[in-house]
Image (cartoon, rainbow, N blue to C red):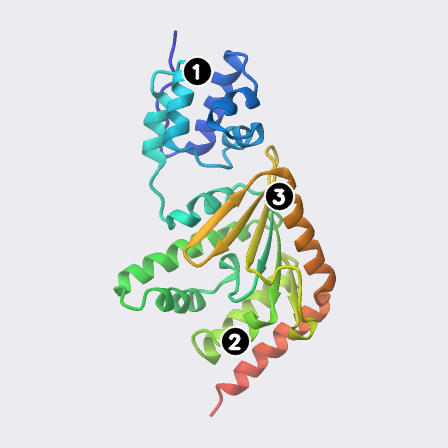
Amino acid sequence: MTRPKDLDPSSNPRALLGAELRHARERTSLSQEALGAPLFVSGSFIGQLEAGTRRMHLEYARHFDETLGTGGFFARNCRALAKSKYPDHFAEAAEAEAVATSIKEYAPLLIPGLLQTPGYAREVFIAHRPTAPEEVIDELVAHRLERAALLSDPTTPLMWAVLDEAVLRRTVGGPVVMAEALRHVAKLARKRRVIVQVVPFEMGAHAAMSGALKLMTFADAPSIAFIDGLGIGRLEDDPATVARHELTYDLLGANALSQRESLALIESVAEDYTHEDQP
């Protein structure tokens, strides 16, 4: 039997690994559900692995090699792909984000990473790692800007951000940094590259007060939700759980300011920061 060759790291290795998984599974006439059952994962999760939207962990790779007779191919390549430039709790979400067709994000405290300016990102990283050398901070900022390059495409992915008003009012890095950061968000909104809404303080209690939320959809895989916290993150792919989070996001959007009102507020607060910086 001809075995698959190891992947070329210069290509899209996660997508290629997923394609090889689909090929090997179909060759043995196993369904996604049957392949996932011994691992206690759903068929939709196997589909996400095959589509390259989820990372393959070593324990899964070993099971696939044994079940599909691939001679250690998945385990070898899984080890090679395990390293990431992102923190462990966020790495898989960042990889999924890169192939998503739509990203909907609720941000309670910070401008979402994809919408941050270099100055704003730098202040965020310094706050998290106050003793880190400058070269480490530079590297972290560079990685964040690489993620933001997703928005260089004029249409894909669709990006929809709902910001709590606290995001606008928390002075990260001082008035100059905040004015620049908010104008950048406003510019993206005016170019119709992103949809931005603001949940005002006067709204009071709302459906997502417990924390940040990110929803991602894909062309050929089920939707997933990412729940973010302090140094932790969890991807959810259970359809019922994702549906609940989608309802939460819909409720936020329905009760937030309109796009026009949100843009006016963002630009007004940016102007306030500009005047605050004047002598």
- Decide which of tag 3 and tag 1 comes sooner along the chain: 1
Which residue, as the protein is rendered here, is positioned at the far top?
Answer: 1
**Of 237 and 163, which appears nearest the observer?**
237
Callout 3: 10 Å neighbours few (<14), some, many (20+)?
few
Q: Which residue is mark 2?
A: 179
Mark 1 secondary-structure assignment? helix
Callout 1: 10 Å neighbours few (<14), some, many (20+)?
many
Q: CA distance from mark 2 to mark 3?
A: 37 Å
Q: Is residue 177 left or right of residue 249?
A: left
Q: Is residue 12 visible?
A: no
**Of 119 and 152, which appears nearest the observer?**
119
Quarter the N terminus occupies: top left
Mark 3 secondary-structure assignment? helix
Q: CA distance from mark 1 to mark 2?
A: 56 Å
Q: CA distance from mark 3 to mark 1?
A: 30 Å
Q: Which residue is mark 3?
A: 241
Q: Is residue 36 above or below residue 68?
A: below
